[in-house]
Amino acid sequence: MFYWIYDLPTWALGALISLGFVAIAWTGTIAFRATVHKRLRSERRANDLIGFMLSSFSVIYGVLLGLIAVAAYQSYANTEDTVSREAASLASMYHMVANYPPPARQALELAVGQYTLQTIRVDWPQQQRGVTPTEGSRRITSLYSVLLAFQPRDSAQIILHTATLDELNRYVELRRARLASVEAGIPAVLWFVVMVGALLNIILIWLLDMELHVHLILGGMLAFFIGLVVFIIAAMDHPLRGTVSISSGALQSVYDSLMKEPAG
């Protein structure tokens, strides 16, 4: 996979892929008219046979693209749900540590707030570049240390402490699921099949014999649509990478509403 495409703006990525397919279709159409078409004209049914092959192949390729697009969207939606639940878990944990007695309360609130800010300002930009963040693990370890150092004094504190540790463990699981999505994506072998299938579709378009302007219009339309579908799949393939990615908005909302110190 060419990961540099995720550094491009969304419109530029879409234009690059879609117009790239159109350029290939038009270039091949013009080149084939001067060479291959002269040989095909001796077969009167050539257009009918090529059209039949094109329609049959397009159905199979369309099903393949549809399944891959659904899988990419499902992965995107699952990661978005994980981020939302991660933000909700952080909010619950912050509410819990706010009920600890001082000085543990201040230390825990500071640790959770700093961790959340670190995730928003440092980890998220790294994820968008395809880098799996590591600094957050150290802050999680520090948070565990502060919690485990606390000694409950009564049954109410025991219940609160147990619930807080359970919530932290749940959050760590959600965080690991998010980090696993940074490098996850459609296997390279599937991308190979997608690109080969697109090329075969375009080659069949090249082989059709018709007026040049009609050939260019029909071939360009088909190639442009194939390019759009490939663009959608590529854009959603890595949910946390590039400009078409899940934002840190859910975490930012939790930080602004609970953890951020009032101005002034």
Image: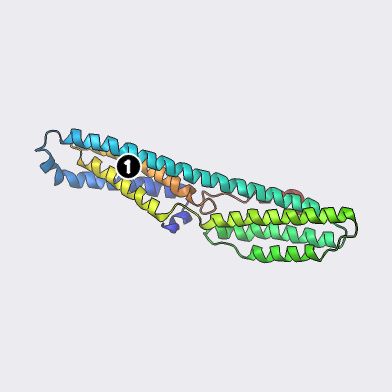
Classify 10 Å Cα crowding around label 1: few (below 14), some (14-19), many (20 and above).
Answer: many
Q: Nearer the viewer, residue 26 or 172?
A: 172
Identity of the residue drawn at 39% across and 51% down: 190
- Where residue 41 sits, quadrant-wise, is top left
Identity of the residue drawn at 47% across and 54% down: 6
In the current view of this chain or complex, which residue is farthest to the right? 154
User: Where's the C terminus, which quadrant?
Assistant: bottom right
Residue 34 visible at all? no
Which x, y percent locates residue 134? 61, 65
Identity of the residue drawn at 28% across and 35% down: 55
Q: How is the image coloured?
A: rainbow
Badge 1 marks a residue whose secondary structure is helix
Which x, y percent locates residue 234? 44, 49
Which x, y percent locates residue 249? 64, 48
- Where residue 58 sits, quadrant-wise, is top left
Please give left or right for residue 102 compared with residue 115 in the image: right
Which x, y percent locates residue 262? 79, 53
Residue of label 1: 223
Q: Amino acid at mark 1?
A: Ala
Q: Nearer the viewer, residue 55 or 223?
A: 55
**Count of numbered badges drawn on the protein:** 1
User: Where's the N terminus, which quadrant?
Assistant: bottom left
Residue 53 visible at all? yes
- Where residue 119 sits, quadrant-wise, is bottom right
Identity of the residue drawn at 28% across and 36% down: 56
Please give left or right for residue 175 compared with residue 108 in the image: left
